[in-house]
Image: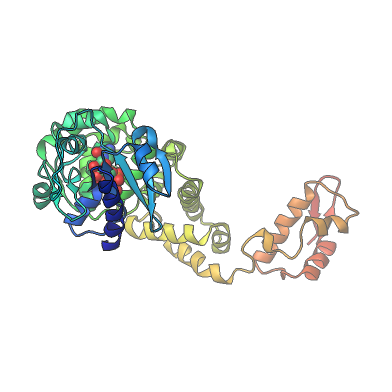
Amino acid sequence: MQTLFEAGAKIIRKLNERGFEAFFVGGCVRDFYMARDIQDVDITTDAKPEEVESLFEKTIDVGKVHGTIIVMAEGTPFEVTTYRTDGIYTDHRHPDEVIFSNRLNEDLKRRDFTMNAMAMAEDYTFHDPYEGREAIEKCEITTVGYASDRFGEDALRMVRALRFMSVLDFGIEEETGVAMTANAHLMKHVSVERIVTEFKKMYNGVALDQAKVKLVRTGLARHIPFFSEITDDDLLKSRVDDLLDELIVQVIRDPSLKGSLHHLKLSNKELHTVKGCAALHEALEKGDHPLEVSYSFDEDILERFAAANDQNHLTQQSSLLQKAQALKLSLPISSKKDLEVDGRDLMELYSSRSGPWIKECLNIIEREVLFGRLKNNHNDIIDWVKTHVKVESASIEIIE
Ligand SMILES: Nc1ccn([C@@H]2O[C@H](COP(=O)(O)OP(=O)(O)OP(=O)(O)O)[C@@H](O)[C@H]2O)c(=O)n1
């Protein structure tokens, strides 16, 4: 924590030397006050992006049009953003003291919550014109000024309020909460990627249950893709501590929700996890053989499902699931790629005859090996094929 601020202080001092104002701002100041771990440090300044770029050796333009430049210092990225304000700079700096200007106040005034609208000088002096520290002491999430104005500027802030509620275990101040209900419909203007980013943080928070109650009571859930299709009761009933687990539980409860998963624009890996758990549930309910369940599903899917099942009783087939997990270590092969023969070996056996029979034959060999009826050894498999497989024109026949 110290080192991040120390490295950031060097950036601030350099900007100050050139006559610019610069302060730590936002979440890092809030977390510093709360003695929480600090992930990243943001700096606000009256220097323009081009001026920031010209002052530092290594910069990355991540959003110059919005005033943000990344400055790399000691291998760490610092977001340096030009004041968001239309005001006119009126203060005059005294050489011996830190002056917090009106323009800084204007910048802070445009931020979401009072606890996020604090600035801190490089000597750790706080500038807190909207009483963010008081809100923190009260464990309260309060917007800067009129809540409806702040939510009108960016509706995502309503979901951020839920995120902070869950992560910090804070309550939402009454008027802020009322404005969330009144402005819930504005969620339709927010990109789902931004919502999902906040939801992931919210689901990892310590007070998720109370955030979920608020998500339902404010009506925000009704305006969020996928969540709008879950009943309030089902959303509140699930016991999870991760967004993907919520999706897994809900998709298993109502398989028709699978069709809406893509609205959340998850990564392929995340989609694979949720859909894999749903498919595993189906296999368990069908009562598939434990060997097949073990072979067909990745270990992380089996583990993830087992954890969600422990909390939510998704299946009656827990013993089948346990057997499948236990078998994972002793499977003779973990995929078709592990077979000691491939399509080319089979083709050579039958005068280079290609066709769909090869795939069919490999599928049969795979099952024989999986169930231990055939050793995964090149010669054994070739002998078995020679004696058990008759290749017809387009398909194959197995001779017992
Ligand atoms: N919709 C938003 C998003 C951000 N902010 C401001 O930008 C700061 C940085 O935002 P971000 O990094 O997204 O969140 P943090 O508050 O820093 O929280 P954390 O670092 O824990 O994600 C916030 O503190 C807040 O002052 C805002 O006013 N409105």
Ligand 1: which quarter? Answer: top left
Identify which residue, 81 or 147, lies in the foreground: 81
- Work out whether 14 lies above or below 81: below
Identify which residue, 184 or 286, lies in the foreground: 184
Instruction: Determine whether, in the image, residue 150 is placed left or right of residue 14.
Output: left
Quarter of the figure that contains the N terminus: bottom left
Q: Quadrant of residue 313?
A: bottom left
Instruction: Determine whether, in the image, residue 7 is placed left or right of residue 271.
Output: left
Q: Is residue 242 visible?
A: yes
- Work out whether 148 lies above or below 275: above
Quarter of the figure that contains the C terminus: bottom right
Looking at the image, the residue that sits furthest to the front is: 95
Q: Quadrant of residue 190?
A: top left
Q: Residue at x 14, y 40 (%)?
A: 142
Colouring scheme, one of rainbow, by chain, secondary structure, one colour: rainbow
Q: Is residue 212 visible?
A: no
Q: Residue at x 15, y 42 (%)?
A: 93
Q: Residue 177: where, in percent of width, then height?
A: 15, 37
Q: Residue 170: where, in percent of width, then height?
A: 16, 49
Q: Residue 196: where, in percent of width, then height?
A: 36, 42
